[in-house]
């Protein structure tokens, strides 16, 4: 059995690094808080008997060499950065549970045939530079050197921050791992499905793809008092109808998540009819074809609104990350473990992105969820109980035994 108290103590300790006065946690990459957290993870890894190193992007890696070094490696872990004013379970649970799993197996006398590699990924969240998952992207050979030009709010580039931190942005290619059998990630759900179904484990079937657009509706500006209502070319009215239709259409499809997160009006003056309005659109679904059909419907409705209101509607693609399906073979192993241990598990999809999605072209993956109280995450109230953390770690430990034996 994993040491529940030790795992909980580790989570609480790591949660003090970058802790804000209000109890939230801010731990951005390539900062003093990041360094302190990384050193803490290195110490825990060494105490668990892992050979520790740090790669060119700053990922923290601990290796347990298997009996047969010719066999591919089983990789496990998650990220240890946070969003601004985040919580202490997101990402960190997966790293700490992986270390605890290794320590538990070693103490029980288990010796893996495949090497087991534990990793703490750098900068999954992307809050500081706007470029997320650089750690896992580098491991998968997907890191974009052009993104090193990205700047934080103080004008510091990602490249300079990495150099100042002591890692090597010019050697991103050296981070790629070409010796992997699979990657397994334990993570908090960040939703309410497990809690509502009173399940302790979520077996993730896949991660929804993310498609983002900037939508611009252009109309005609005018005086708010002297311009008659009839005949106005008001982009705000057209936008309102478009977003309403978007919401109603998404509600009829359980697989689709549609979100408008930002709205900007031009000129944005109280007594002036807007000339233009811009807004963001985030679409998520496990089936990429569903997104294409959904957007075709919305584009057609946009053409109707152009005729009705005398406006122009333009959709500019900004991001298109395809969905990622988790391995059926490894999902079955998680299911078997839960059945044997009498743990209630349910299958579900993830609407949030995770590091494991970058491994789609690299190796098979498994993603295991534990409950998030009230579904809250990315805020100080983020919470997963001690018991649920331990159950997740126990399932992960057994999973590693079966895949690395």
Image (cartoon, helix red, strand yellow):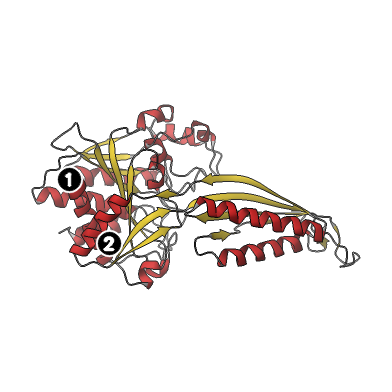
Q: Quadrant of the C terminus?
A: top left
Inspect this view and state whether residue 10 appears.
no
Residue 148 lies left or right of residue 179; in this view the side is: right
Residue at left 24%, top 36%? 72
Image quadrant assignment for residue 13: bottom left
Give the percent coordinates (x, y) of residue 106. Answer: 12, 47
Question: Which class describes the residues within 10 Å of circle 2: few (<14), some (14-19), or many (20+)?
Answer: many
Residue 236 lies left or right of residue 378; in this view the side is: right
**Disc 1 element:** helix
Q: Quadrant of the N terminus?
A: bottom left
Per the image, the residue denoted by label 1 is: 47
Residue at left 11%, top 47%? 110
Residue 144 lies left or right of residue 301; in this view the side is: left
Instruction: State the separation of the CA atoms marked 2 and 1.
Output: 21 Å
Give the percent coordinates (x, y) of residue 338. Answer: 23, 62
Per the image, the residue denoted by label 2 is: 389
Give the percent coordinates (x, y) of residue 291. Answer: 56, 53
Residue at left 39%, top 39%? 361
Decide which of 350, 86 is in the foreground and name it: 350
Give the percent coordinates (x, y) of residue 36. Answer: 33, 45
**Disc 2 element:** helix
């Amino acid at each position: 059995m994993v040491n529940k108290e030790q795992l909980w103590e580790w989570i609480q300790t790591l949660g003090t690094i970058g802790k804000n006065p209000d109890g939230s946690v801010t731990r951005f990459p390539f900062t003093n808080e990041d360094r302190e957290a990384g050193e803490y993870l290195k110490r825990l890894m060494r105490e668990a008997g892992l050979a520790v190193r740090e790669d060119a992007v700053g990922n923290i890696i601990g290796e347990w060499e298997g009996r047969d070094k010719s066999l591919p490696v089983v990789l496990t872990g998650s990220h240890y950065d946070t969003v601004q004013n985040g919580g202490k379970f997101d990402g960190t649970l997966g790293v700490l549970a992986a270390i605890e799993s290794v320590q538990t197996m070693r103490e029980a006398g288990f010796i893996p045939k495949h090497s087991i590699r534990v990793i703490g990924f750098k900068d999954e969240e992307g809050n500081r530079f706007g470029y997320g998952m650089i750690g896992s992207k580098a491991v998968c050979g997907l890191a974009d050197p052009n993104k090193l030009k990205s700047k934080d709010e103080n004008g510091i580039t990602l490249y300079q921050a990495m150099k100042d931190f002591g890692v090597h942005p010019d050697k991103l290619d050296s981070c790629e791992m070409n010796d992997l059998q699979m990657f397994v990630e334990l993570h908090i759900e960040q939703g309410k499905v497990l809690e509502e179904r009173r399940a302790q484990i979520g077996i993730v079937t896949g991660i929804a793809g993310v498609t983002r657009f900037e939508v611009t509706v252009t109309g005609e500006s005018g005086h708010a008092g002297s311009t008659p209502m009839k005949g106005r070319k008001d982009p705000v009215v057209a936008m309102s109808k478009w977003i309403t239709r978007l919401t109603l259409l998404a509600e009829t499809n359980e697989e689709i998540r549609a979100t408008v997160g930002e709205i900007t009006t031009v000129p944005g003056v109280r007594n002036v009819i807007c000339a233009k309005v811009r807004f963001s659109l985030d679409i998520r679904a496990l089936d990429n074809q569903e997104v294409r059909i959904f957007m075709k419907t919305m584009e057609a409705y946009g053409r109707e609104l152009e005729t009705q209101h005398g406006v122009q509607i333009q959709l500019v693609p900004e991001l298109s990350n395809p969905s990622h399906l988790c391995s059926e073979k490894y999902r079955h192993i998680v299911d078997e473990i839960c059945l044997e241990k009498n743990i209630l598990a349910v299958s579900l999809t993830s609407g949030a992105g995770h590091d494991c999605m970058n491994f789609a072209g690299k190796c098979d993956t498994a993603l295991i969820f534990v409950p998030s109280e009230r579904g809250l995450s990315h805020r100080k109230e983020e919470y997963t109980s001690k018991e649920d953390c331990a159950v997740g770690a126990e399932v992960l430990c057994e999973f590693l035994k079966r895949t690395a034996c």
